[in-house]
Image: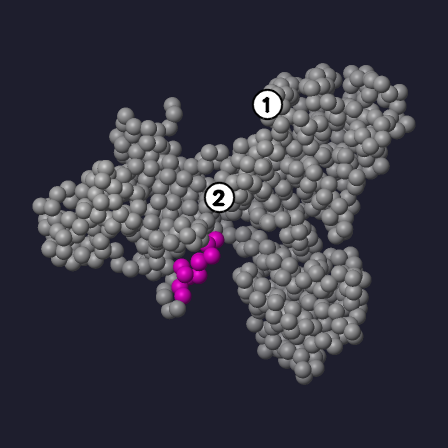
């Protein structure tokens, strides 16, 4: 597959079908761009009505080109494209870029037209980029190909950019030129009739010119295959990947679908795919390139301890606040470092971190402070802030940064604040591989992105771990419940039977079907119990008044039975009531939620977050595609905003995170083994201190018959 893509990415010869001399036409722009870029191969214009295009001899048809053609660029009306592709197939063309629009993105006959195109591509084994795309740029010196209708050929760099949107590409190229950012490859792939984002990632993984991969995606063709490919790039090839995925909102998803003609998975599934594969999801183009520049020019930090060197207190405080928000640590400088700073700085300067050089700071002062802090073993990286002052010298200050950094393998980002006054210094910094950001918060966010990537690299790459499970018994339970039904909501007791097949720690419980059984069951369960309604028609037991806690006597158990059943009948008079579950009262712990659902595109998706009654309001949850690696379960747990609660706060001991991870892996295995599980919640899973495990306190499972 990669070999075939090579014929598109680095063709030895190109035929432009639809090349023309007509001003302002796409055919003229593409042909001119290839010439102007200094393409190193052979170029053939194809136009039945022209003797030459841009002074290059034209051919009326592909078949009349006397030599082999590696790639054809097709710029003809949509209804002619399949016929031209047939000619390309007979000519034994290996690859093609179809610029033309008017395919599945317009729906109706456009979908039929694209399906016809796919048939031709498969028939002749041609690799195809597009249709409905801007084209491809390859900056390799041995290729120098601008096979696009962009007005700009970007400068060379080590960043690759792939995009589903061609129009976005033109704006990105203009933006990148303004920031002096270069590219190794720049690829617009449009409708993905053949070559998709997975093919391109596999190519870029092996591309020696590419160190950082950027993506704009509106949908993903195959979530599981994308995930495995991206994982390989993250943990084997060690190339950072950053992505914008549009369509977060339902309205945005509909707009994306109408743009590409593609089905879209849920945004939660995309979050899961990115997290599990090591891709960092960003919010917009500015953030995308802020991070990309840092990754492309600086070493990845070995930790999250940063130093801040500034000539202004306010910006230093802003950077500190931003660092804490983004889980960076303000490094504690050693006493030796502080002593050196004291010897080199005026008495009014701050020798603590942030190191404040005060407003009249000279470049010599910056040099001494930066050198001292970077040499400190407690510092993993530094952010240098310069606020324009009347006496400052931006160029001289900029010149000291690469001089100090040389030979020190630590991350350094700058924020020479503003645009015009600092422009001379900024140009020098960027020319010498030091990224600069107009304001400190942007530098901090870029540093945090690099730290997150470094932490990923520090995790062990682990495969899927199979947990001990009684899959056959679970299948029988599901089969019985779905007999003669398309859907079935399992009562908590039924759900617990299924959970026990996969080793979940379920509390002892028994079903009371009438009041006379209450005394006997109470004797068997224990001295303190919880009682809950058991009904397939009542999902939210608390809302129905169907849960009573900490019942300690037989008399209280009898009263609870009557009250719970009365509340349930009042809440839903038509509800089927199996009885009341009496369960051993769990001791207090931290409540978390585990859940799963099925995404229409990507299959089973697991959820984790803090549990209890407010989970739907707080929405502090993370997602993972099943089946998942141990790494994925760990990242889900650490990914919630309230992870500090699990680490222990205000004197509380750390929770048993290993037990949570094992339950997430059991959940992942269970929903992967049984596609009939459409939805499920374990809420709460009560987690105890490290080493003490956890227990399932409540659960619900919705089963759906799977078509044969």
Residue 214 in which image quadrant: top right
Q: Is residue 233 left or right of residue 20?
A: left
Which color scheme does this rendered protein use? one colour
Residue 260 in which image quadrant: top right
Circle 1 SS class: loop
Q: In whole angstroms, how far apart are the C-alphas of marks 2 and 1?
A: 30 Å
Is residue 139 shown above or below 696? above
The residue shown at (62%, 23%) is 110
Is residue 477 shown above or below 664? above
- The residue segment tinted magenta is 639-649
Residue position marked by numbered label 1 in the rendering: 108
Instruction: Let me know if residue 640 is in the magenta part.
Output: yes
Residue 5 shows up from this direction: no
Furthest residue to the right?
55
The residue shown at (34%, 58%) is 590
Furthest residue to the bottom?
347
Q: Residues within 10 Å of mark 1 (few under 14, many from 20)?
A: few
- Residue 159 horizontal/vertical position (percent): 69, 46
Query: Total marks drawn?
Result: 2
Residue position marked by numbered label 2 in the rendering: 268
The residue shown at (46%, 44%) is 624
Front in this rendered view, residue 609 or 463? 609
- Residue 668 horizontal/vertical position (percent): 40, 42
């Amino acid at each position: 597959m990669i070999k075939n893509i090579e014929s598109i990415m680095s063709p030895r010869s190109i035929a432009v079908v639809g090349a023309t001399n007509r001003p302002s036409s796409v055919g003229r722009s593409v042909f001119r761009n290839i010439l102007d870029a200094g393409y190193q191969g052979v170029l053939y214009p194809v136009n039945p009505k022209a003797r030459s295009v841009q002074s290059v001899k034209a051919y009326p048809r592909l078949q009349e080109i006397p030599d082999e053609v590696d790639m054809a660029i097709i710029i003809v009306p949509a209804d002619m494209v399949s016929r031209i592709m047939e000619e390309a197939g007979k000519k034994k063309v290996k690859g093609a870029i179809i610029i033309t629009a008017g395919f599945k993105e317009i729906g109706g006959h456009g979908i039929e037209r694209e399906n016809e195109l796919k048939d031709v591509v498969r028939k002749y084994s041609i690799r195809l980029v597009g249709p409905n795309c801007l084209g491809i740029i390859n900056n390799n010196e041995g290729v120098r190909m601008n096979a696009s209708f962009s007005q700009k050929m970007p400068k060379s760099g080590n960043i690759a950019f792939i995009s589903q949107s061609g129009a976005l590409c033109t704006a990105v190229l203009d933006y990148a030129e303004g920031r002096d950012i270069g590219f190794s490859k720049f690829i617009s792939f449009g409708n993905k009739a053949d070559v998709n984002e997975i093919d391109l990632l596999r190519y870029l993984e092996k591309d020696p010119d590419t160190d950082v991969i950027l993506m704009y995606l509106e949908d993903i063709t195959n979530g599981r295959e994308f995930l495995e490919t991206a994982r390989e790039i993250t943990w084997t090839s060690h190339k950072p990947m950053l992505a914008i995925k549009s369509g977060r909102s339902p309205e945005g998803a509909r707009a994306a679908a109408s743009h590409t003609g593609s089905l879209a998975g849920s945004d939660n599934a995309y979050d899961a795919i990115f997290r599990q594969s090591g891709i960092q999801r960003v919010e917009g183009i500015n953030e995308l390139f802020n991070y990309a520049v840092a990754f492309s020019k600086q070493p990845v930090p070995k930790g999250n301890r940063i130093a801040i060197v500034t000539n202004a207190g306010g910006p230093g405080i802003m950077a500190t606040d931003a660092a804490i928000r983004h889980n960076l640590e303000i490094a504690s400088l050693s006493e030796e470092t502080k002593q050196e700073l004291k010897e080199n700085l005026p008495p009014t300067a701050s020798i603590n971190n942030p190191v404040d050089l005060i407003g009249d700071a000279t470049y010599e002062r910056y040099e001494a402070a930066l050198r001292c802090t970077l040499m400190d073993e407690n510092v993993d990286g530094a952010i240098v802030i310069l606020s324009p002052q009347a006496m400052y010298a931006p160029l001289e200050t900029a010149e000291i940064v690469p001089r100090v950094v040389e030979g020190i393998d630590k991350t350094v980002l700058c924020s020479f604040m503003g645009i015009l006054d600092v422009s001379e210094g900024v140009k020098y910094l960027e020319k010498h591989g030091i990224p600069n950001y107009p304001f400190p918060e942007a530098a901090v966010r870029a540093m945090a992105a690099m730290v997150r990537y470094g932490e990923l690299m520090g995790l062990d790459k682990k495969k899927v771990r199979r947990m001990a499970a009684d899959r056959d018994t679970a299948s029988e339970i599901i089969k019985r419940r779905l007999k003669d039904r398309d859907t079935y909501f399992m009562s908590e007791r039924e759900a617990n039977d299924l959970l026990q097949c996969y080793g979940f720690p379920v509390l002892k419980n028994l079903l009371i079907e009438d009041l006379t059984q209450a005394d006997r069951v109470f004797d068997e369960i224990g001295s303190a119990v919880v009682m809950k309604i058991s009904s397939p028609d009542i999902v939210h037991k608390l809302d129905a008044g169907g849960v009573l806690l900490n019942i300690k006597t037989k008399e209280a158990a009898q009263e609870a039975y009557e009250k719970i059943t009365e509340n349930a009948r009042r809440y839903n008079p038509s509800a089927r009531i199996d009885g009341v579950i009496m369960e051993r009262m769990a001791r207090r712990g931290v409540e978390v939620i585990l859940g799963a659902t099925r995404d229409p595109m990507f299959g089973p998706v697991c959820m984790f977050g803090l549990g209890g009654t407010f989970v739907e309001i707080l929405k502090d949850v993370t997602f993972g595609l099943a089946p998942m690696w141990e790494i994925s379960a760990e990242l889900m747990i650490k990914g919630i905003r309230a992870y500090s609660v699990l680490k222990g706060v205000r004197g509380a001991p750390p929770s048993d995170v290993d037990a949570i991870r094992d339950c997430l892996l059991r959940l992942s295995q269970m929903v992967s083994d049984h596609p009939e599980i459409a939805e499920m919640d374990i809420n709460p899973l009560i987690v105890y201190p490290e080493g003490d495990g956890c227990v399932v306190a409540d659960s619900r499972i919705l089963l759906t018959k799977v078509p044969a």
